[in-house]
Amino acid sequence: MPSLSSADFDALASRHGALLHRSRWQTWRVPVIALTILAYLLFSWWFFGIGKILATANWGIAGNYLADWVSYQIRPELRIDRDGAITISYSRFDPAGPNPTPDWLVTEKAVITRQPEKAAIPAQPAAPAASSAFNFMGAAPQQQAVQAEAPSAPKQEEAVVRAEVSLGSHAHMTVKPGKVIVTQGTESATLTLDQAKERVDAEGPLPEWLEQRQPGGRVLAYFGFNGWAEIGPERVRVNNRFLGWANFIFDPTSAFFGKSAGEVWRLVTSGERLDKSRSNLSLAWNDFLYNPSWQHYDVWSKLLQTLVMAFVGTVLATVIAFPLSFLAARNITPSRGMNQITKRFFDFLRSVDMLIWALFFTRAFGPGPLAGISAIFFTDTGTLGKLYSEALENIDDKQREGMKSVGASPLAVQRFGVMPQVLPVFASQALYFWESNTRSATIIGAVGAGGIGLKLWEAMRTNSNWQNVCYMVLLILLVVFLFDGISNSLRSRLIGKNSQ
């Protein structure tokens, strides 16, 4: 290829200078775009106070919340009596079940002298006073019995006088009358309990993982994932955390609670009936489904309700959006007025968020799946109608013209000239919305539209059943993954591509 001479180059530059010289925008567009993005990020950082939020955030509490999703806590309370006895009790619904004897809480017993409370005995009634006055009630009044306190002798009794509590492999507490020794790692602290003055005093400075907000007040001990403890002058509350989900199969109220898998199998297959009215297999299945701690049957039924809400709402939206999209497409329906009315109707339905529709229908129909189905139906009708009409407006008119040229009726033109082009697209979009609505139905359920979303919200509101929240979230994820795979496979077959 011959090279240009300087004269030819000057002549070319005089005729097409814009092609040989870059404009200012072309020269500076990259730095301008970069500076604009940086300025926007800095403005957002300042406007939303992100720096302050990050600085004041309590990351420890966030970590505890996440730990609650995959763990459970056993909460013994050690009450120290004035005579030196330690009474250990558990909450009513503690995961340890009735009569717990954990191996991480070791007690030492001894004979102590208990000073019983003074017993009150009634005094002998006084003799009626001599009187010649006439008693209109028919009898002389008697003086009220005077309560007298009778001393009782002290008694000897065996009681717990020392308790060793292990929290994980690096934390330990020794509880005894008047003193608590807390150890974590290589650090240790001794706390003196004064019940008379209702004070807790530390012997020396407290480590960072011990907190006493006011002098003489209770002391909080934090042991990370292993839990925490609250130490007061009369009692010590322990929250010992363990990895896993407690009583997921059988609740403490079940006859199978505390039994190994082998014992349960023997009872189910060949053991003597625990309930004369049903087999052990039926009893075990019933105890699992109606486990009061995890409520498997209720959770699964609510999950199925969510799936039905998503399916029915999507099907109804598809059925209504399909014919309306032909009215909205300009190349199918030549009436501009009809096009605009239908498109504005679609805009109205999809401009209101599904959550707002759910709130509206919850007030109209009351809490339940009907409100959720209606919210999905309204929102998806608007969105699918818009997508369907745009797909119709972008079809190849050659097939339609070919059908018209052979004298086909208008219905036959749509059936054989339009439908083969758009039907795979319509079905693919409907499948995508069905899979997406499986997630959306969970969100709208939290505002009263029924399904597992409402149950999930109820568990979160208690701020204590985070294991149940995790259980339901995992079920939702499993269902979403399953439906996503099914939807992708069907869409790939419809559009003629291999599934990814």
Image: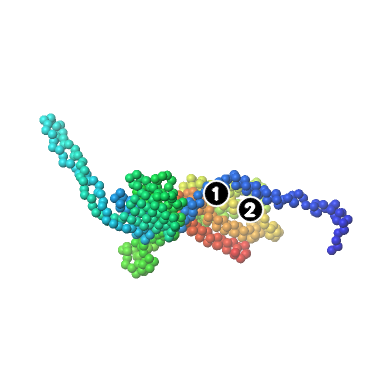
Residue 137 shown left or right of residue 458 in the figure: left
Q: Can residue 242 be seen in this view?
A: no
Give x and y (percent) for residue 370.
49, 51
**Residue lying at the far front of the rendered structure:** 204
Give x and y (percent) for residue 348.
59, 46
Badge 1, how many Cα within 10 Å: few under 14, some, many 20+? few
Q: What residue type is labelled 1?
A: Leu
Q: What residue type is labelled 2?
A: Ser
- Tell me the residue at 36%/54% (across/down): 175
**What is the distance, in whole Å, between disc 1 and disc 2 at their CAs?**
47 Å
Of 197 and 492, nearer the camera is 197
Of 63 and 115, nearer the camera is 115
Figure coloring: rainbow
Q: Mark 1 points at which residue?
A: 54
Q: Is residue 209 visible?
A: yes
Numbered tag placed on residue 389 in the rendering: 2
SS assignment at label 1: helix
**Residue lying at the far right of the rendered structure:** 7
Give x and y (percent) for residue 31.
70, 51
Badge 2, how many Cα within 10 Å: few under 14, some, many 20+? many
- Tell me the residue at 57%/58% (across/down): 431
**Residues at circles 1 and 2 in contact by the CB criterion of under 8 Å:** no
* 130 shown above or below 386: above
Question: Which quadrant: the N terminus?
Answer: bottom right
- Tell me the residue at 43%/46% (across/down): 213
Of 381 and 485, nearer the camera is 485
Report the number of numbered marks.
2
Question: Which quadrant: the C terminus?
Answer: bottom right
Of 263 and 297, nearer the camera is 263
Q: Which of marks 1 and 2 is nearer the N terminus?
A: 1
SS assignment at label 2: helix
